[in-house]
């Protein structure tokens, strides 16, 4: 690795004995995000499109170049060691699993995201977003407030209903025990991710955090385990009660991801209860805060760009007129400008600003340099999305029209959902959910910045497992006439 480090551009930060550059990530979540931004810009300004740094004895290669990122994401599929600490709750669930486990699981999971299956979830998004708007009435016209809790409970309720087929009703019941346990587990996981000295399991087990994590995790596993058991039983009963001739008939009712997974993993490959628990928890984990962060950043930008908000509103008027009818699956493809606004938000504020992989066997880059086994790889999506080489001189500008008037300069220039074989499976699901929530909100309300001068200040960002707004997405809402 030392030889390799001499062939690649290196970070300007001083290397300390033993820890290398690990010290630069100490400090607050905001400091950590600032470091990632700086590293991304360093990589962008280097001729080889990378910067390198040492985390203890391991060399990490950071890139914000779309071509190189595309190559790495297609070639190196193993997740980085650091992400192992996120597996406590999801076990071998596909998102963090080793390649040999991930591959067959992805094969089973992918067909459950077919357009036909996704269209049936539109009704859930529509119903849950109506609840969100109803809950928000308490804040309308009353000055600045954080919209985060409203949006994250909307996504939690939608994801749980579409994944497990149950209503956890977290929008109306903030003390919902599943939500509390799930939130606590993810908080503990992200705190651990930022403290490398807790990566070692034996060390972590000695901390009070592990005990608390284990208690929450046991609760979650029991909750999901019971749903799986009862779902399997009712599917069995349903089959038994159906006449033989009806067995192959199409089942028209709404099917949750859990039921779809039981179907797709059928036959000899049928999933055990543990596998079903792991995969459904992956969907809840991967689908909740990510979409909530994307939606919340969009509200912040709409508040700061009233002309963009007005254009979205005009498009909504064209599709819905003055009616109060719910959003349907057929409406969503017509909301092309809103789609561009969300994409532009995800470009400038990607909820997952960095992703990490590991080199599991030597790989030679197109430049001829060979990466050695066990190097870490960081794709800096935040910087890649602001790279003028792919986005032009106005890369830093919020301009949704770019998604309507200019084709992508490279297939990997826009990758909020990652790229290559391990890219996000929930991409279309997330776009549907975000579009439904934002249209429900904007049809009746105008979004304003928290204060009159707010739109002049740059957004302050922080990083745990995801990128968030330091001020917790504070806006104002007023009713439209
Ligand atoms: C704005 C919302 C979302 C964003 C920004 C996002 C982003 C991502 C990213 C960056 C990855 C890949 C990580 C990597 O390459 O290491 C990923 C993976 C994944 N996402 Fe999403 N995601 C979103 C919503 C969702 C939703 C709603 C679901 C499911 C309902 C979902 C399910 C998954 C799954 C299953 C994977 C793992 C894929 C695999 O390893 O094969 N995501 N997501």
Image (tube, grey):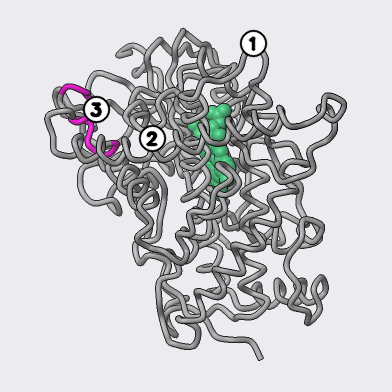
Instruction: Give the quarter of the image for residue 303.
Output: bottom right
Q: Quadrant of the C terminus?
A: bottom right
In the displayed image of the protein, which residue is found farthest to the bottom? 481
Secondary structure, mark 1, is helix
Position above or below: 389 against 103 = below
Q: Are marks 3 and 1 in contact (CB under 8 Å)?
A: no
Label 1 residue near ligand 1, CB within 8 Å? no
What x and y, as percent, mark residue 51? 40, 31
Magenta span = 193-202
Residue drawn at x 35%, y 49% as measured from the top left:
183
CA distance separating discs 1 and 2:
25 Å
Q: Mark 2 points at which residue?
A: 221
At 21% from the left edge and 27% from the top edge, which residue is drawn?
A: 20
Residue under label 3, please give it.
199
Taking the image as four quarters, which one is ligand 1 found in?
Answer: top right
> Residue 209 location, x and y as percent?
19, 39
Quadrant of the drawing holding the N terminus: top left
Q: Which of marks 3 and 1 is nearer the N terminus?
A: 3
Q: What element carries label 2?
A: helix
Q: Nearer the viewer, mark 3 or mark 1?
A: 1
Q: Mark 3–mark 2 contact, CB under 8 Å?
A: no
Q: Which mark is residue 268?
A: 1
């Amino acid at each position: 690795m030392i030889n390799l480090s001499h062939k690649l551009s290196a970070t300007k930060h001083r290397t300390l004995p033993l820890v290398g550059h690990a010290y630069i990530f100490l400090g607050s979540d905001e400091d950590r995000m600032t470091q990632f931004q700086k590293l991304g810009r360093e990589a962008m300004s280097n001729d080889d499109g990378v910067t390198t740094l040492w985390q203890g004895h391991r060399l990490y290669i950071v890139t914000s170049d779309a071509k190189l990122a595309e190559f790495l994401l297609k070639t190196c599929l193993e997740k980085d060691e650091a992400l192992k600490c996120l597996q406590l709750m999801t076990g071998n669930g596909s998102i963090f699993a080793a390649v040999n486990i991930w591959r067959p699981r992805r094969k089973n999971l992918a067909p459950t995201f077919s357009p036909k299956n996704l269209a049936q979830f539109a009704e859930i998004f529509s119903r849950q977003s109506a609840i969100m708007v109803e809950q928000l009435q308490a804040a309308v016209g009353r000055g600045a407030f954080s919209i985060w809790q409203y949006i994250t409970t909307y996504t939690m309720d939608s994801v749980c209903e579409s994944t497990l087929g149950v209503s956890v009703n977290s929008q109306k019941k903030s003390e919902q025990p599943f939500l509390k346990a799930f939130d606590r587990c993810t908080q503990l996981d992200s705190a651990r991710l930022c403290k490398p000295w807790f990566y070692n399991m034996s060390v972590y087990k000695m901390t009070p955090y592990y005990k608390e994590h284990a208690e929450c995790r046991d609760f979650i596993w029991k909750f999901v385990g019971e749903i799986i058991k009862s779902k399997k039983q009712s599917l069995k009963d349903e089959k038994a009660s159906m006449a033989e001739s009806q067995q192959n008939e199409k089942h028209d009712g709404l099917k949750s991801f859990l039921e779809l997974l039981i179907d797709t993993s059928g036959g000899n490959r049928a999933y055990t209860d543990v596998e079903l628990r792991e995969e459904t928890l992956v969907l809840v984990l991967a689908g909740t805060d990510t979409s909530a962060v994307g939606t919340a950043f969009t509200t912040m930008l709409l508040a700061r760009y009233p002309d963009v908000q007005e254009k979205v509103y005009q498009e909504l008027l064209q599709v819905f007129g003055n009616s109060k009818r719910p959003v349907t699956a057929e409406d969503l493809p017509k909301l092309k400008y809103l789609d561009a606004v969300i994409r532009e938000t995800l470009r400038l504020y990607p909820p997952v600003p960095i992703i990490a992989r590991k080199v599991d066997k030597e790989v030679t880059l197109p430049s001829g340099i060979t990466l050695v086994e066990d190097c870490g790889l960081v794709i800096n999506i935040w910087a890649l999305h602001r790279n003028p080489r792919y986005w032009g001189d106005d890369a830093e500008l919020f301009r949704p029209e770019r998604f309507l008037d200019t084709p992508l300069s490279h297939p990997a220039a826009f990758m909020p959902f990652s790229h290559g074989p391990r890219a996000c499976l929930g991409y279309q699901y997330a776009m549907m959910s975000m579009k439904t929530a934002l249209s429900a909100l904007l049809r009746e309300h105008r979004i304003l910045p928290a204060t009159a001068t707010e739109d002049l200040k740059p957004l302050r960002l922080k990083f745990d497992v995801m990128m968030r707004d330091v001020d917790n997405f504070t806006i104002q809402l007023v009713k439209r006439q």
